[in-house]
Image (tube, helix red, strand yellow):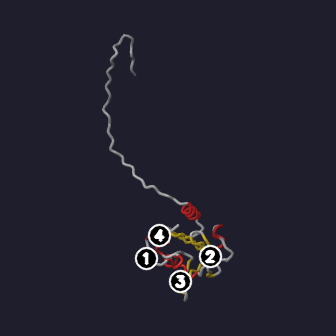
Amino acid sequence: MLDVLPGAGPELSLSLAPLIRLDTVKVTGTRVFVSPETAEFESRRRSGFGRFLDQDDIARRPGISTTDHLRTMPGMQVVRSRYGDAVMMRGANGSCVPAVFVDGLRVEAANSQINELVPSHLLHAVEAYTSRILVPPQFQTLNGCGSLVLWTKQR
């Protein structure tokens, strides 16, 4: 507390305790852009209703075919056909052919053309819903099987 009295001089002298210096703090960050598709993918993954591979999972096994990545997912089966590797989903009623979506759009191509539809070097993420009741509305079909959703890096 400081009392200034009438008649005291116009000068005032104060002493302060020495300052404590802190080390410099450096803050760094990376700007992350999350596309609407990526945000929706993460939301579906958190729901726990499907099987998922993200870009980190795919990067851990570079240079193999897209169906080789799918082969590592529970509930998925890759069988060799005369037209290429066909993807099947194993369920309570045996194996069935899933509906295939690429970048959110239904693809009516032959199931054995997955490696040609989405080559491994373009594969960004995978969603596999091995039961019809687990499939999110935007990937539901009337085929009676699950759905396979492939996301590419070229979106």
Indicate whether 84 appears above or below 9. below
Name the residue nearer the viewer: 130 or 139: 139
**Mark 2 → mark 4, Cα distance in angstroms:** 23 Å
Which one is earlier in the sequence, the residue at label 4 or at label 1?
Answer: 4
| Mark 4 nearby-residue class (10 Å; few <14, some 14–19, many ≥20) | some
Q: Residue at x 40, y 22 (%)?
A: 1
Horizontal placement of 90 versus 115: left or right?
Answer: right
Earlier residue among tags 2 and 1: 1
Helix, strand or loop status at disc 4: helix
- Residue assigned mark 3: 85
> 10 Å neighbourhood of mark 2: few (<14), some, or many (≥20)?
many
The amino acid beneath tag 3 is: Asp
Q: Is residue 2 left or right of residue 57?
A: left
Question: In the rendered structure, are the residues bearing label 2 and label 4 in contact, judged by CB atoms less than 8 Å apart?
Answer: no
Callouts 1 and 3 close, C-beta under 8 Å: no
Secondary structure, mark 2, is: strand
Q: Which mark is residue 63?
A: 1
Which residue in the protein does label 2 denote?
A: 99
Q: CA distance from mark 2 to mark 1?
A: 25 Å
